[in-house]
Image (tube, rainbow, N blue to C red):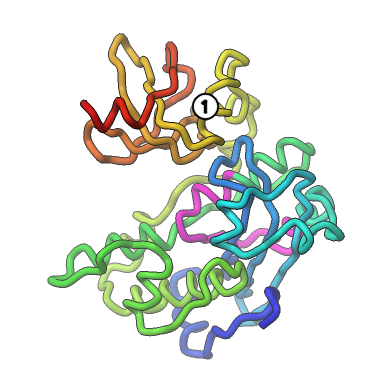
């Protein structure tokens, strides 16, 4: 199967259900990237499915040359190698075409804070304007409904929810993941009485909140932190006089400034640590952490 094609699709009843939630239409998007940090990693694939207010379904797909080597640890997930993207355009032109495709439709993704983080950061880098759209998250949408079930899913990953909803997914093929996101929205919507309230819970942010440089930029003293995150090291953070051991996930733009999204090793919870609040940082040896 081509990466621009999907084994999944939307039938008329699913399209009707989605337009009940989003009467003006919507766009689902999914990316594949060189890593998990929108502030430093690069996009290598963009896919989107658009449903217009009159029920028309169209798709967008492109591979992107990131101009850096794709790390081996990411290839095992999405299967895209350097040779697959070497003749693809670099990000500027595809990004302009993508925003033109989206138009004024609200957008949704699974864990959308990651996907939109890349699109926002890349648009900022090339001074490409994006419309002030509302962004929703199908993961939050599912969690708000399924957590009330007696036997909820074991987690809210896209692949797990796809199985839970009864359809097979070829995960980490971007166009396939966009359809899965929409189908999950439909399936979850069938359980919800107050869909408007649930939709509010799935709202993440409005793109116009990211029109300031401080959303993306971080101090040069934290450049070493970025490398530690890229190398997937355990890190000790000093914040407000206390030291916090973390397992980094990614560096991400936020409306109040960039954050390190990481698992706190003291609590086991994923948290966002604002970079401007980090006083110092250091590599934490895994052997030392396990010993303590």
Observer-nearest of 259 and 80? 80
Residue count near mark 1 (Cα–Cα under 10 Å), binned few <14, some 14–19, many ≥20 = some
Where does label 1 land, which residue? 257
* Residue 19 appears in the rendering: no
Q: Is residue 57 part of the magenta span, yes or no?
A: no
Element under disc 1? loop
The x, y position of residue 148, in whole percent, is: 18, 65
Left or right of residue 154: residue 238: right
Foreground residue among 93 and 76: 76
Magenta stretch in the rendered image: 97-117
* Nearer to us in this view, 285 or 220: 285
Above or below residue 278? Residue 58 is below
Q: Position of residue 172 (x, y in %)?
A: 55, 66
> Which residue in the rendered view is the most extreme toward the left?
150
Judge by depth and name the residue closer to the eye, 131 or 142: 142
Q: Which residue is pictured at 62% across the width and 65% down the height?
A: 79
- Is 79 positioned to the left or the right of 93 in the image? left
Asked if residue 100 lies in the magenta stretch, the reply is yes
Quarter of the rendering containing residue 156? bottom left
Q: In which quarter of the image is residue 157?
A: bottom left
Residue 156 makes an appearance in the image: yes
Which of the 4 image quarters holds residue 53? bottom right
Question: Please, is residue 158 above or below residue 254 in the view?
Answer: below
- Image-based side of 271 in relation to 93, left or right: left
Image location (x, y in percent) of residue 204: 45, 48
Question: Where is the C terminus found, in terms of image quarters?
Answer: top left
Q: Is residue 284 above or below residue 83?
A: above
């Amino acid at each position: 199967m081509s990466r621009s094609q999907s084994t999944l699709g939307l039938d008329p009843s699913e399209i009707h259900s989605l337009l009940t939630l989003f009467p003006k239409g919507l766009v689902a998007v999914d990316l594949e990237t060189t890593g998990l940090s929108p502030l430093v990693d690069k996009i290598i694939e963009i896919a989107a499915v658009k449903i217009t207010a009159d029920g028309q379904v169209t798709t967008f797909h492109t591979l992107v040359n990131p101009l850096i080597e794709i790390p081996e640890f990411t290839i095992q997930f999405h299967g895209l190698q350097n040779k697959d993207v070497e003749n693809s355009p670099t990000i500027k032109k595809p990004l302009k075409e993508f925003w033109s495709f989206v138009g004024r439709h609200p957008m949704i993704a699974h864990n959308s804070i990651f996907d939109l983080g890349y699109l926002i950061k890349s648009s900022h880098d090339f001074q490409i304007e994006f419309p002030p759209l509302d962004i929703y998250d199908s993961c939050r949408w599912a969690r708000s409904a399924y957590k009330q079930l007696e036997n909820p899913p074991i987690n809210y990953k896209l692949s797990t929810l796809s199985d839970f909803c009864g359809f097979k997914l070829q995960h980490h093929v971007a166009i396939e993941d966009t359809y899965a996101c929409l189908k999950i929205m439909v399936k979850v919507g069938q359980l919800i009485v107050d869909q408007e309230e649930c939709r509010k819970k799935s709202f993440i942010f409005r793109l116009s909140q990211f029109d300031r440089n401080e959303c993306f930029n971080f101090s040069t003293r934290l450049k070493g932190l970025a490398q530690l995150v890229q190398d997937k090291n355990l890190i000790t953070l000093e914040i407000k006089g206390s030291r916090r051991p973390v397992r980094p996930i990614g560096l991400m733009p936020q409306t109040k400034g960039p954050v390190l999204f990481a698992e706190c090793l003291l609590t086991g919870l994923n948290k966002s640590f604002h970079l401007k609040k980090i006083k110092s940082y250091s590599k934490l040896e895994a052997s030392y952490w396990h010993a303590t």
